[in-house]
Image (spheres, grey):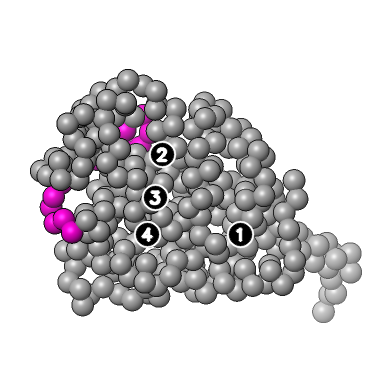
């Protein structure tokens, strides 16, 4: 039998090693470039993902589109966790693996000076981004906390960004929900000052707000990639907490057209609402699921327990290991 020369064997082994060292090319969706997504961008730009053998590509997509893509296997992760929760309640094999915040930095504002309270909004339309999103859930939680019926108001989808701002300034709708950071550069606009802040939702409600979801299949078949992704995210979040100016500069580099005043306010809101460790308590999750189930007309006995929607086990393992290692971010 003819023997293969050692030189050829060595080249083959080196080639296999180089191939094995190639990073896994993964894709994640975000809805826009804001401070809420900074930990993921930081993990990519600082090399935290690459150190885990991950080359991350970011795609901008709405929550509904992102959820459909995640279910079909076209993407690996999405930052539209709220949309995936609705899909999970309908039976989708997805899981939320990271929760960014435990309260929304939202304001419910009227555009009509005569509308000053929740009672004044009876039968009125409230502007949100899309049906079933965190804006609508936040409004429904607000009604619940105020002992008002869920049909007290109607909902008009506006999309994100400029369409919402235009509706606020023009008064096209009686009221709308808007992030306080997005409102910051508009506060001196006479049209904005004409209305009223009816509810500061940051102070009045708590809910799992933004985060990351993936497929149950990826968690089952490639747990090391999920763990590596989460390690990068945790490092990115810790960097964000420690280095405000560097984080803002990173976001401005990705989106130079953004108003700096809005971005600074967005950073402050994100840090003030962020969860301590990327998880939300079961009681908070259960309350959120109950509201979503009602929205989806799902019977209470069909609502899954929190651990069948949120799986924090990989995150907790990653966080414990990082804490034990003493890892700290550097500029």
- Foreground disc of the pair 1, 3: 3
CA neighbours of label 1 inside 10 A, class few (<14), some (14 to 19), many (20+): many
Who comes first in sequence, dot 4 or dot 2? 2
Asked if residue 69 lies left or right of residue 226, the reply is: left
Q: Residue furthest left?
A: 123
Instruction: Report the disc number at residue 152.
Output: none
Q: Position of residue 238 (x, y in %)?
A: 64, 55
Name the residue nearer the viewer: 176 or 327.
Answer: 176
- Foreground disc of the pair 4, 3: 3
Q: Is residue 323 above or below residue 177?
A: below
Q: Residue at x 16, y 63 (%)?
A: 297
Q: Residue at x 75, y 50 (%)?
A: 330
Total numbered labels = 4
Magenta stretch in the rendered image: 147-164
Residue located beneath label 3 in the image: 202
- Foreground disc of the pair 4, 1: 4
The residues bearing labels 1 and 2 have C-alpha atoms spaced at a distance of 25 Å
Who comes first in sequence, dot 4 or dot 1? 4
The residues bearing labels 2 and 3 have C-alpha atoms spaced at a distance of 9 Å
Residue located beneath label 2 in the image: 180
The residues bearing labels 1 and 3 have C-alpha atoms spaced at a distance of 24 Å
163 magenta-colored = yes
Q: Quadrant of residue 303?
A: bottom left
Asked if residue 54 lies left or right of residue 177, the reply is: right
Instruction: Report the disc number at residue 207.
Output: 4
Residue located beneath label 1 in the image: 234
Q: Main secondary structure of the magenta part?
A: loop
The residues bearing labels 4 and 1 have C-alpha atoms spaced at a distance of 21 Å
């Amino acid at each position: 039998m003819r023997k293969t020369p050692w030189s050829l064997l060595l080249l083959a082994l080196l080639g296999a090693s180089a191939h094995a060292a190639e990073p896994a090319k993964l894709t994640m969706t975000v809805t826009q470039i804001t401070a809420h997504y900074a930990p993921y961008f930081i993990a990519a730009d600082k090399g935290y993902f690459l150190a885990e053998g991950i080359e991350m590509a970011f795609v901008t997509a709405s929550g509904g589109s992102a959820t459909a893509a995640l279910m079909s296997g076209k993407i690996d992760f999405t930052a539209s966790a709220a949309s995936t929760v609705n899909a999970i309640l309908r039976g989708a094999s997805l899981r939320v693996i990271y929760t960014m915040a435990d309260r929304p930095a939202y304001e419910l504002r009227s555009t009509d000076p005569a509308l000053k309270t929740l009672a004044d909004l009876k039968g009125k339309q409230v502007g949100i981004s899309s049906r079933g999103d965190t804006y609508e859930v936040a409004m429904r939680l607000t009604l619940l906390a105020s002992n008002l019926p869920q049909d007290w108001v109607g909902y008009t989808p506006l999309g994100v960004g400029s369409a919402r701002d235009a509706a606020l300034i023009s008064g096209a709708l009686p009221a709308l929900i808007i992030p306080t950071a997005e409102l910051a550069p508009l506060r001196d606009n006479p049209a904005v000052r004409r209305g009223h802040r009816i509810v500061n939702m940051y102070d009045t409600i708590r809910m799992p707000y933004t985060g990351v979801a993936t497929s149950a299949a990826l968690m089952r078949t490639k747990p090391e990639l999920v763990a590596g992704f989460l390690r990068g995210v945790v490092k990115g979040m810790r960097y964000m907490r420690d280095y405000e100016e560097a984080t803002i500069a990173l976001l401005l580099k990705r989106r130079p057209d953004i108003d700096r005043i809005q971005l600074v306010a967005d950073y402050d809101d994100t840090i003030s609402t962020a969860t301590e460790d990327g998880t939300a308590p079961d009681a908070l999750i259960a309350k959120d699921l109950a509201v979503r189930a009602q929205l989806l007309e799902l019977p209470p006995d069909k609502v899954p327990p929190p651990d069948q929607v949120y799986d924090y086990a990989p995150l907790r393992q990653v966080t414990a290991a990082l804490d034990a290692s003493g890892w700290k971010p550097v500029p």
